[in-house]
Image (cartoon, rainbow, N blue to C red):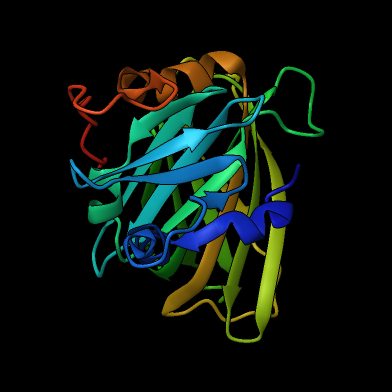
Amino acid sequence: MSAAEWRSSCLRVAGVAAAVVGQLAVPEPPHTTGTVRWCLDVGRRQVHAHNVGGQEIVLAYAVAQVTSTAAAFQPLPPHTSYNATEDLGAFREGLVTVAPTLPAAGVAGLDRAIVFAIRALPLGITVHTVPGMDVTVVRDERTRLFRLTISSPTQPMEARVQASGAGGTVSVTAMLGGTSHEPTQHEVELPPGVDLSPVLRRFLVELLVPLSVYERATAERRGAVRNGLPEPGAAPVPVPAPAP
């Protein structure tokens, strides 16, 4: 499944939080996004994200500030949940993307997908996606064209990017190296026709990576996952702080 097909899953975090808290006033089924049910624990004042589907998904949070960005990637295997309260607070002004980790189609060996979206991204500000993968959009002062720079790990990967600005949206797909023993920075020129300066209205990235890269990228946050939903009174599971 391509990043474009997951546009509808890129939601404002504040909107998700408001919809879940709204359950207090009007009894209704839990707020859902894809296969994720956002469940409110009134007694502990917590919101839990519960994956009721049959395959693993990732909740990708991202927010842009004037001089920096923050991102967090929470894996949720089938029928598991995690306490999303801290993330909903930390990324309140940002977006959360809910997407499956198995791409519908891709290059052999690139069998996991990480999808995230960010809005109001200042040009030139680096987005720290997952460890070893930083993404930045800059402008070439000589050609006046915009280009994407991506630092990737030593393994090969594919990046599918959409960037929106004045005049519409441009898209680009690039295969990234993996031929050296050190992380490499790649540059990809974006098609002309859209002005992305000084702020990208929306930036959508789908990274297709080997399973080993995906597992390293999500290892720390797996400690916050539990089977099903917690029982009333159960001890909370700590959630790692978002990357700066």
Q: Could you say which is closer to the camera, residue 64 or residue 221?
A: 221
Q: Could you say which is closer to the camera, residue 93 or residue 22?
A: 22
Left or right position of 160 against 238: right
Q: Residue 189 sits in which quadrant?
A: bottom right
Q: Quadrant of the C terminus?
A: top left
Q: Residue 64 sits in which quadrant?
A: bottom left
- Percent of width and height locating residue 197: 47, 79
Left or right position of 46 against 95: left
- Percent of width and height locating residue 70: 30, 50
Residue 132, visible in the rendered structure? yes
Left or right position of 85 against 37: left
- Percent of width and height locating residue 238: 19, 27
Residue at 73% over, 33% down: 103
Q: Is residue 165 above or below residue 31?
A: below
Residue at 70% over, 80% down: 193
Left or right position of 25 against 186: left
Q: Residue 132 sits in which quadrant?
A: top left
Q: Is residue 168 above or below residue 244?
A: below
Name the outermost residue toward the front. Answer: 27
Residue at 22% over, 45% down: 86
Residue at 70% over, 61% down: 171
